Image (tube, rainbow, N blue to C red):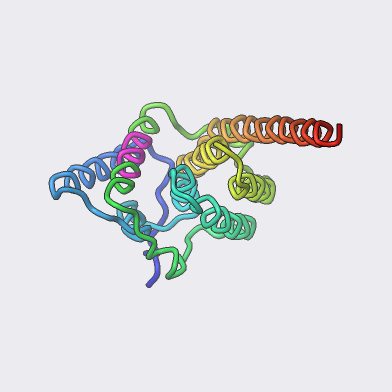
Amino acid sequence: MTAARLAPAGPSRHESLRLARRFRQALGQAEAAGGAALTVKDLLLLHGHASIATLLMLYALFCLMPVGGVGNVFGVALWWLSWQWARGQQQLVLPERVAGIRLNARLSAVVLRALASGYRVAARWLRPRWHGLQAPWTQAWWASWIAVQAAVIFLPVPLGNALPAFSLVALGLGRLLADGLMHAASLVLGVLGLVYLGALGQMTWQLVVGAARWVGA
């Protein structure tokens, strides 16, 4: 089983509106049926293609779920995606194991609602601009950025998934709609995540040192 290999969506506000409408309809159908457990492949089929930008957003959204181990699984998936990004791949074939990952009905509804809202906002505010941040020479740099954020997501840090995950969602939207402003937003969110990680690490180290001194006293 592989994800569909269709042409990626172009940088169009109309495409965002179409996707928002499609996810609202899917959410309405799921709620009318009393809930539906979707797989990663189902979410890709709703997009109509398996572009690298689409997968980046989906993986990052999954990392926000309050489920143990999700950050580890999709952190590894994001590392692999960063390698594919560096190689310039646009359309991806999803591994069987990842495509078959199934969300429960509640999480499926959360993801559908988030995607519908996100694409609706994107249609209103995002547009092709700031092309310098999307130049071909930046490709390897952005791949490294994805790998760094994936590493932060992988670490067992309290609330450490949020900022890097939102950073990658912004990058995915920027890639999908050719909006360099979202690339810049990805940098800001990711840097804030690294600052949070550093501050938490320093605080933890100080607690450990203090405890060691207290025990040795």
Range covered by the magenta-colored residues:
111-119
Residue 86: name its quadrant.
bottom right
Q: Position of residue 154 (x, y in %)?
A: 60, 50
Q: Position of residue 90 (x, y in %)?
A: 51, 57
Please name the predominant secondary structure of the magenta segment in the image: helix
Q: Nearer the viewer, residue 156 or 37?
A: 156
**Magenta span includes 115:** yes
Q: Residue at x 36, y 37 (%)?
A: 119
Residue 202 position (above or below residue 102):
above
User: Which quadrant of the rendered structure holds the N terminus?
Assistant: bottom left
Residue furthest to the right in view is 217
Q: Nearer the viewer, residue 188 or 208?
A: 208
Relative to residue 55, is residue 45 drawn left or right? left
Residue 131: name its quadrant.
top right
Q: Nearer the viewer, residue 148 or 142?
A: 148
Q: Residue at x 62, y 37 (%)?
A: 133
Q: Position of residue 28 (x, y in %)?
A: 18, 42
User: Which quadrant of the rendered structure holds the C terminus?
Assistant: top right
Residue furthest to the bottom in view is 1
Q: Position of residue 193 (x, y in %)?
A: 62, 34
Q: Residue at x 37, y 65 (%)?
A: 100
Relative to residue 108, is residue 131 drawn left or right? right
